[in-house]
Amino acid sequence: MHREDWQKSLMSSMSERRKFINVTTADQGMFKTLTDVEMRRSTYVAVSLGLLLPPFVGGSLMGLIGFYPMPEFFLIFTSYTSVYIAGVIALFAYLTPSMVRFVIGLTQLEQAAARVLAQRAFSRLPWYLLGGVTLYSIGGALSADISLESMGYRQFSLSDHLYNQFGLIPVVLITSFPIFFYYIDSLGRYLGPRGISVTAVPMWAKLLMLGIVTPLLIDSLLIGYYLNRTGYFEWQTLLLWFSLMVLASGGTWLAWRSLQQGILPLQVFINTPDMDLAERARTSLMPLSLDEFGALTSRFAELLSVRNQLSGELHRAEQMANAILDHAGALVLVLDRDGRILRFNRACEELSGYSPEEAIGQYPWDMLLPVEDADQVRKNAFEALAGDPASLKGHYTNHWLTKSGDKRLLDWSNTVLLDDQGHMEFMISVGVDITEQALIEQTLRDSESRLLRFNEELEQRVTNRTQELQSSLKHLNETQTQLVQSEKMASLG
């Protein structure tokens, strides 16, 4: 695919994603990430519901069905039952802060350790919740029986106690389900966005609760109500109850099979990490259902295809950049924000004598710079630039000390890459070896100096010779004048 094609595909995907975000913006409130305060509040709400729903809602439901006399049942909250509920509330008031600290403390651990600990704890959470509510409800039913007996409203035999406990089962499940789903969803909205994603309750368990347990509860409540009101129970009633359970189980199995068909491609993709990503996407990400999971699988495959194309383009661009850097005549040195070497191209390797394995991760002033220049370069160049990227200078020169002990003079040009906060993230230095050029320039300067001194000496000699000639000419003129004067005197004589 050409660059223009995958760019269009990427822009189309981003456009579709923006449309999806715009459509679902109104629904994001219920799926927002929970804060620590909101998670703490959700925990206390779940515990409060677990303490209040079984005695008040569950007990009222059992009274309406016929297990307890109504409205006399509500007087139990002024008797032994109130003492029992107060004791349980005090116990959970003591235990709940520890549970809150455990959940919030998971976010302070390393993600791998937090996931292991969360998986071990939350995989047993449904059983803890169901067991706790069950024990609490059993004790509540016994305390209700004792309260009604102490107030003289009704006397219970052993069979009556067992019958009430049997009638309590659907009530316990009905009151546990809302608390269970509420708290599990709160944990997901708190821990999932923080990278702690575990399977506390698999999909089949949720579907089993909705598809089998819920009809079981409804049928049991109806049969209990019918039995309490009429006292009539025949094998036809039991057969009807069993037939409804078979239908619920079959419908649940078909629903889970359909749901599993949609989930299967994603499960296969996730569970084969040893295979190449592109191969995994090509062989497993094929939608098998016409529902949200099928659409999600298809969309995920498209995004992975675009991702693979972008990765290929990035890999080719990286190869090209590496080839350019390694075959360029200039030295390329990349430092991180701490000053350690991240990139050491072939020109640096050939000049310094150090391999990239020896150089990467080292500080250049500890390995490459002469002792007399190291502190100055570190303080005046790197640290000053890291503290104030605006102080970047175009060029500077310094010496490198090669592995063999030779000293080379280099001319550098720096470029700084900044992060989102405007701090230096990388420094890229491009250098040129100017040792020979400096020697030639020094030789030229020395030659110019010698030529200048020669010119000065020559000028001085010319000046002295001229002065000597002028002096000789003056002396000659004086001698000639004396000879003329002598001749004149001789003529007069």
Image: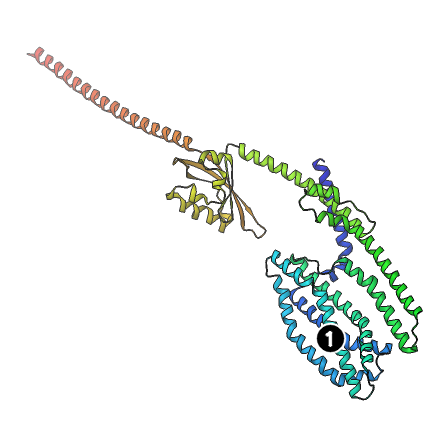
Q: Quadrant of residue 188?
A: bottom right
Looking at the picture, how far across and down is residue 120, in whole percent?
A: 66, 61
Q: Quadrant of residue 24?
A: bottom right
Instruction: Tell me: 170 left or right of 345.
Output: right
Pick the front one: 30 or 5:
30
Looking at the picture, how far across and down is residue 264, in whole percent?
A: 77, 49
Quarter holding the N terminus is top right
Quarter holding the C terminus is top left
Which of the colour schemes (rainbow, by chain, secondary structure, one colour) is used? Answer: rainbow
Q: Amino acid at mark 1?
A: Tyr
Few, some or many C-alpha atoms within 10 Å of disc 1 (few <14, some 14-19, many ≥20)?
A: some
What residue does disc 1 label? Answer: 136
Can see residue 49? no
Instruction: Tell me: 403 left or right of 305.
Output: left
Q: Residue furthest left?
A: 493
Looking at the picture, how far across and down is residue 169, in whole percent?
A: 80, 72
Label 1 secondary element? helix
Give the answer, above or below, for where 332 lies relative to 39.
above
Q: Residue placed at 66% from the left, 75% from the top?
A: 93
Q: Quadrant of residue 451?
A: top left
Instruction: Tell me: 53 left or right of 244.
Output: left
Pick the front one: 484 or 269:
269
Give the answer, above or below, for where 25 lies relative to 441.
below
Q: Residue placed at 8% from the left, 14% from the top?
A: 489
Give the answer, above or below, for where 337 lies relative to 431.
below
Pick the front one: 414 or 86:
86
